[in-house]
Image (cartoon, rainbow, N blue to C red):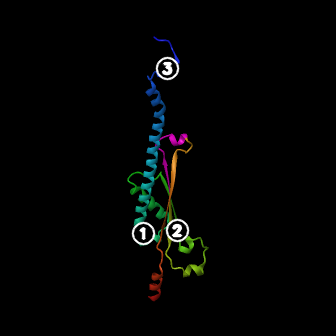
């Protein structure tokens, strides 16, 4: 065996590939895992949005949904969300909040006023808020202080806006 020299060490290429692989592999693995994590987040947000749209779409066609209490609507929306989510959502993944407003003025934050409320012929308005919470697939986000789950909030308003032509037709009748 030849004696150790620095020149010989610099010329030798044995083991360089193994060292380079050992240095780059964790970085590549981290990148792939985060790519899958971000793809899953996008999927869950998209599925949640489609499920909420589908759950509320049927309410827009039913005239009596305005007459139901917010609690009944909340339970119905939760069930429709689960049914429309292709099995991705469970009742543990989201929280539904329904706020009912008597008219558009009340939605805008106006105080209750009998005189103005009696003149306002706008239909009731429902504000639906869904808070989605999903745990991460990998432990990497927790290592960076992002917690163990991501959260997303959806907001939808249900109601019919009156137009000037609708008001004129009602006045003519």
| Quarter-of-image position of residue 116 | bottom right
Mark 2 vs 3, N-terminal side: 3
For the point 41% across and 51% down, the residue is 88
Q: Nearer the viewer, mark 3 or mark 1?
A: 3
Residue 142 drawn in magenta: yes
Quadrant in the picture for the C terminus: bottom left
* Element class at badge 1: helix
- Tag 1 residue: 60
Q: Earlier in the sequence, mark 2 or mark 1?
A: 1
Residue at numbered disc 2: 100
Q: Residue furthest bottom?
A: 172
Q: Is residue 13 magenta?
A: no
Looking at the image, the residue that sits furthest to the top is: 1
Q: How many marks?
A: 3
Q: Position of residue 4 (x, y in %)?
A: 51, 14
Q: What residue is rendered at 46% in x and 47% in y?
A: 38
Q: In this rendered view, identify the residue nearer to me: 59 or 108.
A: 108
Q: Secondary structure at mark 2?
A: strand
Determine contact: label 3, label 1, CB under 8 Å: no
Badges 2 and 3: C-beta atoms under 8 Å apart?
Answer: no
Q: Is residue 122 above or below residue 69?
A: below
Q: CA distance from mark 2 to mark 1?
A: 15 Å
Which of the two residues, 171 or 42, is positioned nearer the viewer here? 42
Residue density around tag 3, few if under 14, some if 14–19, many if 20 or more, within 10 Å: few
Range drawn in magenta? 131-143
Q: CA distance from mark 3 to mark 1?
A: 76 Å
Vertical placement of residue 157 versus 44, above or below: below
Q: Residue furthest front?
A: 7
Q: Earlier in the sequence, mark 3 or mark 1?
A: 3
């Amino acid at each position: 065996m030849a004696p150790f020299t620095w020149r010989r060490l610099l010329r030798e290429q044995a083991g360089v590939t193994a060292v380079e692989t050992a240095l780059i592999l964790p970085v590549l693995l981290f990148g792939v895992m985060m790519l899958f994590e971000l793809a899953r987040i996008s999927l869950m947000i998209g599925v949640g949005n489609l499920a909420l749209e589908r759950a509320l779409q049927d309410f827009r066609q039913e005239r009596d949904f305005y007459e139901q209490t917010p609690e009944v609507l909340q339970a119905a929306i939760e069930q429709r969300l689960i049914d429309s989510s292709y099995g991705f959502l469970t009742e543990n993944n989201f929280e539904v909040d329904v706020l009912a407003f008597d008219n558009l003025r009340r939605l805008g934050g106006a105080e209750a006023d009998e005189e103005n409320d009696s003149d306002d012929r706008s239909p009731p308005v429902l504000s639906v808020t869904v808070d989605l919470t999903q745990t991460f697939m990998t432990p990497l986000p927790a290592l960076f202080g992002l917690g163990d789950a991501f959260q997303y909030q959806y907001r939808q308003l249900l109601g019919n806006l009156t137009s000037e032509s609708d008001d004129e037709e009602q006045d003519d009748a």
